[in-house]
Image: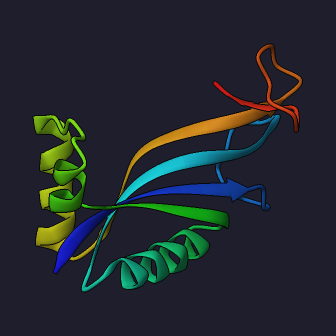
Amino acid sequence: MNVYTLLVEVGRTRNDGLPDGSTGAALICYAAGRDEAEAVRETVAILKQADLSPLDVTGYGSLDERLAEGHEIDDEERALMQRALDENSVIIAQMQPFFKGCEGAGDDGDTLH
C-alpha cells in the first residue's frame, strides 16, 4: 500500500456543505491504495458519499514519487499521509472553495479564496 496525493475539483450539489455562493471547490486529499487508480476510485466514492460532486482528479503520485520529483513535504503533510496509510483511508487535508466574479478570476470566472 502507498499513499497518493490527489487534487480533486468538485462541483455543487444539494447538502454538499460548501460555502454559500461558491461554485465548487478544490480538495487536496491523501488516499491509501495499492496503486494510484485504486486511490482515485476510493476517493471519488468517499466524496460522493459525503454529497460532494467530483468533477476532475489530478494525481501527484506517492510519497516516494513526489520526493523523487523534488517536492518539499513538511512534517504535518507526512503525518497526514501516514494517518491515511495507517487507517487505509482518504484524508481531506485542504479545501479551497471557488467563487464566481471575484478579482483575479480565471477564464471561466472562478477563482480560489
Q: Residue at x 42, y 82 (%)?
A: 37
Considering every residue shown, the one lying at the far front of the view is 69
Find residue 22 and report its horizontal and vertical position in percent: 77, 38
Rendered view: 90 above or below 110: below
Q: Residue at x 16, y 37 (%)?
A: 76
Rendered view: 94 above or below 42: above
Considering every residue shown, the one lying at the far top of the view is 103
| The quarter of the displayed image where residue 1 is located | bottom left
39 vs 62, nearest the viewer: 62
Q: Residue at x 79, y 61 (%)?
A: 14
Quadrant the C terminus occupies:
top right
76 vs 60, nearest the viewer: 60
| The quarter of the displayed image where residue 98 is located | top right
Find residue 59 and report its horizontal and vertical position in percent: 44, 63
Q: Residue at x 22, y 60 (%)?
A: 65
Find residue 56 and report its horizontal and vertical position in percent: 65, 64
Does residue 52 appear anywhere in the picture? no
92 vs 2, nearest the viewer: 2
Colour convention of the picture: rainbow
